[in-house]
Each structure stands twice: as C-alpha cells, then as structure tokens.
Amino acid sequence: MIKKNLWIVALMAVVAFLFMGCPDNAGDLKSGYKSNKTATDDLIIDDPKEIAALLKAKGYYGADTGGCSTDDNVAIFNLAASPDNFGFELNFPEDAEGYLSLEVTFVLDKVDLLTNGAAKIGFQSAVGADLKPYDDYEIVFGKAVDEKEHKQVFSLNAPNVLPNKQVLFKHNKYGPNNDDRNDPKTGSEAPVNYRLKITKMVFKAGDPVPCCTDCDVATCKDCEAEECTDACGTGCCVIFKGDATTKIEFVKGTTAAADKIVHTNPVLNFSGGTKVSAIGVVTMNNYSIIYYKFPEDTAQFKIADYDYFTITYTLSNIVNSDTVLAYPDADYDASGKAGSANRNKNLKVEFRDYGGVDPFSIGRWDDLGGVGANQTKQKQTWGDNGTNGVAIRMNSWDVNPKQGDGSCAESIDIQITKIEFSKGTRHTVEFFSPMTPANNNFAKVIILNGNTLGDKMPKVTNPGWTHSGWVDDWKSDANEPPLTANTVTATTQIVKDTKLFATWLFIPLPTIAREAAANDTLFTAVGTWNDWDETNYPNAKSKFVFDSKSYWVIGDTRSNNWGTKATAIAQATYDAVKAQLGFTYVRYAITGLETMSPYFNSYTNLVVTYDMIQVAGDHTAIQIRSSNDGGSSTDIIAPNLEAGTGKTFKVPVSAIEPGYFSFVKSGGAGSVMLFRVTKVELVFE
C-alpha cells in the first residue's frame, strides 16, 4: 500500500551530527535543491497491485512489446530475438511530484533461460536515451535466483529530473565494454527468459546530507540531491578535507574587472562507479564522469564576463590489465592489441555540458596526457551550451584498440587542484548589404578571438536576388567589393573586429547536377573500422558488383554480428557480400562538392539520388555526417532510407559548407545494404 514514514528522531540526530562535522561551506552544496515538498516524510509504494498499475511493457521501436509482459508487479523478459529493443516503463504516481529521489527494489524472481551470461538491466530516462547525466545506470542480477534484493536510486532533483515522470528499463545483453559477450558477470545474448519482481518504490523527501568522505560513489549520481544513509552510503556527497592545497574552497579574490578568478580545488560531483578519496583524488574508469558547476554570479563578478576556464590537475596511478578483451572471433589474435605506442598511458576525456547531455560546442575531445603534476587544460566557457558548468567524461572508446587507438588508460587517478576563469579578446562583427539597402538591418555579433561565426552568420534572402556570400571589404562608390576583399564563411576564424558585406547575384541559381558514370557510384570508401580491420578484411572497401552495377557495402558487422539474409537476396549474393565485408564496417564520403559551382554556399539543398538493396537484417538507418572520413562529427540527418532504385533525400548545403559529407551505418547491428549514389544536384529553393 502507499504510505508515508516520518523520519525518526535518531536519523535527524545523525543528520545534525554530520552537519556539525562538515566544513563551513557545506551549505553551498544545497544550491541545487529544487523540491516543492515541505513535508519530511517518504512516499512508499509496496502493494503489488499498486506497483502493477505503474508497470507497463514497452516496445521501444514500435507498438510490439517483443515478448515482454507483466504479471502484477513482475516484469517478464521472454525475448527471442532482440532483447535490447524492448523493456518496461515504471511510471510515477501523481502524488510523487516534488520528491528528491526514488529508490526501487528489485528481486530476480525466476530464471528459465539465460543463453550465455546473466540477467542484467539498464535504465533510461526516455526511449533511446540513457539516464542523464549518467551513462552507467544498470544492475547485474546474476545467473540464478538468489532472492537477493537489489536497489537502485534515481535522483529526481535538477538537473536530473526525469522528463516523462517515469523510468524505463530493458535487458542489457552487453558487458561493461560492450565486447566480452561470454563473461558471466555481464548480460546475456538472446534468447532469454526470466522474471523480475518489483517489491517496493520509495520516493524520498528531505534535505540531503552532504558530509561523506572517502566513499565509493558507484550509485551516487547527483550529490546535491541524494540522501547519505550512513558513513559512506548511497548518495554521499564529497567534501575534501586537507590543507590549503587540497581543501575545497571558492576564492572570491577580485572584482569582475580583473583578468581572472580562481577556484582552488572546486566542489566536484561524480558518477559512473567513480571512487573518490578524502583529499579529492578521483579514480576514473571507462564510465566515470566528473561534474563541475561554475560559481554563481555575485556582486564581485559574473561568469559571463569570462571566456576561458583552465583546470590544473595531477595524474597518477595508471592501472591496466595490459590485455585486450577476448573475442569469440576465430580470426582475432594477440596481434590485435598492438595499437599505439602510447597505449594505456593517457587520460582521454570528452567535455559535455553540466547535464552531461550535449557535447561542448567548442572543443569536445581532449587528451589530458599521462602521469604528472600541475598539468593544465584550457577550455572555453562559451562551449558549455548554456548550462554554466561542465561534465568531464572519460573516453572509454580508445581503451580498446579493437575499436579505438588503444592509447587511453583503463583506469587512472586525477586530482583537480584548481580551476581558473580568465578573459580573452572579443571581437565585434557587423554585417551590411550595400546592394540591397532595404535588406540591411543586421544585429552585431560578438565573437571570441579565433572562433568562427557558425550559426551566428546571418541567413539573408531578397526576392529576385541570390545571395552569393560575404566579403570583408567594399568600395564606397560602387556596387561591388574591391579586388582585395576576402571571402568570409561560417567556418572562417575571426581574429579582429570585422565588417562583412553581403554579395548578391541578379539571377536565380540554376540547378547543377553531377552524375555517376553508367552503372557506377559517385562516392568513395574512406576507411574501415581501424587498421586492424583493414589487415584482416582487405577487400572490405572494394566495390561490389550486383546486377552489372557497382555498389559499396554499408553495414555494421563487428563481433561476428551478421543479420539474417534478406528475403529477396540470393544466398550466393549474401555469402559473397559477407566474404568481402567480413566483421567490420566501412565509411564512405562524397567530397569536392564545392567545385560544382563558384556560388556553392548560396544554394539551399543538395538532392541525393541513390539505389539501395537490403542484404542482411532489417534496419536501414544511415547517418549523414559533416566529415570527409566518416569519423566523429556532427550528424546532419539520419534517415531511415527506403530500399529501392531512384530514391532521393535532401541535405542542407549549410550543413555541408566545406563541400563534403559522409555515410555511416547507424543502429541495427547486423544489417547490411548495397548502396550507390547515382546523382547529386545543387538546387536553390
């Protein structure tokens, strides 16, 4: 039944005691407290029927629940094909509004079938999205019923408020590195058949107790919001103690007019199984994230007055297994662990906004180097995407040379001892259109030195005219720029105060087409997964001839993951494609598009005509990336392309301004397509 428990006097006494032992600035950690509950009681739901009303089977890619079902408060996983695509919703009751956290208790109720591993579930905040700002929210139950209660705590406090007032959970077939499929500690490949009983949901109220030190915070996801249940319990908030070089304190220092402000050992929060010592040494592993919230504005300074933040840090205690995860692939051997000469030496990280959601708009990936003291890394506050903080996430991609370059340590200690905020040089960019005086009202833009205009570049139109770009000089007595004027685009670095002038054409732009030779394709292969794959599958980048036409093969077949043959494909064709591609995937690119017209940037869209034939699997998502090699970059569009011949889709020219883009298989591991581009057309619409 739903009931409320008053916090007992003894707990309040513990709280008071812990606060007495906290440093003077402990109260600062409450700044994120957003609860609209004034009561000091918890909301407890432990009646099976009431839990059943909140539990619902969910098909993540459609209405079909994929074998998932419920029996009162029991979630039943009976998945014959794709356990990662289906699961359950655990919804919140109406009177749960405003609580700080949710604790859910699970029991592995029954096991009928686990093919090669353990019962393991992962949580999401929305379909297709990990719980934010966390990446490591999961429970491993094991291989057999042991009647053990497993608890998971979800922060409901900003910035971690779950958007749909529900938690989604699904079977996770992968191991901690998505590679070792036979490890009994990990999930299990399909088919699986087991039951999870949800015995209790507790929505917790009351202020957090931020006084734990030297804690294993594997389940501590938001230190400003969760309750500390014992000396080093769930939800502990770290306050480092020590001398002047280790104590967490904010040094107000100077006024906003000064060049910089300084935090010496700033307040930091952590997630992802991170371990933190009492003096602030963070042990980072594959899933670790460090969160740092910029200081709030005061009468002395405003963060908006500063342009950069520089972290000073010490790296130590590299821990490696010095092995590469074993694959069941027969053709994978010890030579695969060669990788970079710097393997397992450095800490590589990704900078995201404080919510851990969006990558920094300016400078996303960084190598923080190897062991050493007083190292520094400077980033722009302009890249925090408006959240006034940063999440520093370990780049687990490069730990394993099978997938990355193998240069990232598997575990490394970092102590951030100082964060400085400093000012840079800002430039004013003004925009004019002498040829069209009626279309000449543009707002000024402020740009930090060395940055580009990006999406701050105005999009201009004028009926009957075609905008042909911007230049940095103009004749005062003529409708044209001087010969010395330079073209400036959205990707040009701004290094001084600049005036830009719009140039126009008096005629509409004609459609310009580039077509492939008869029975051929326009774009080229630009790389496989990595050098190891190219050694083992040297033909993966070759063209494949089908029905007298040349195609490229697009697919993701790593880890022996080939989907079932498409119905319309002959077995011989399927076998031939499989023999060529092997167990990898190949990226492709269209380049040189800017040479199609001197007014390339003035066109609105590129229309791509393609032929696509499904060979294996049933998933057809293709990522279109703004890069010339298919590597990490901005995804332009990710359409579910329709198989067939003479099909088309559009790419905005503004998204491919450098004149190239690439094709990469997305999702649906095991799906493989033959793909060729027969024509691209620049159109002005």
Image (cartoon, grey):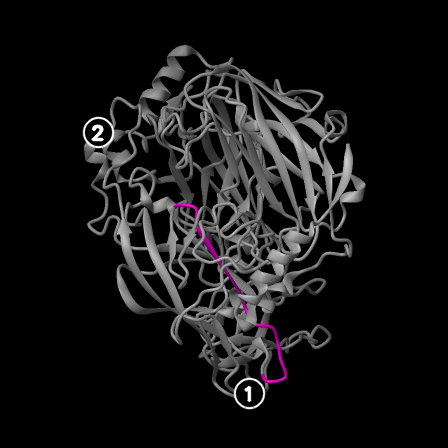
Q: Position of residue 213 (x, y in %)?
A: 46, 58
Q: Which residue is mark 2?
A: 333
**Which quarter of the figure is the N terminus placed in?**
top right
Give the extent of the magenta segment: 286-300
Label 2 and label 1: CA atoms lie apart by 60 Å
**Horizontal placement of 53 versus 398: left or right?**
right
Q: Nearer the viewer, residue 289 or 278?
A: 278
Q: Is residue 310 left or right of residue 2?
A: left
Give the number of callouts: 2
Residue 239 image offset from top left, x and y in percent: 49, 63
* Residue 66 screen position, x and y as percent: 61, 20
Q: Which residue is mark 1?
A: 255
Q: Give whichever of discs 2 and 1 has the lower sequence position.
A: 1
Report helix, strand or loop for mark 2: loop
Secondary element under disc 1, as helix, strand or loop, is loop
- Residue at the (19%, 50%) spot, across then down: 341
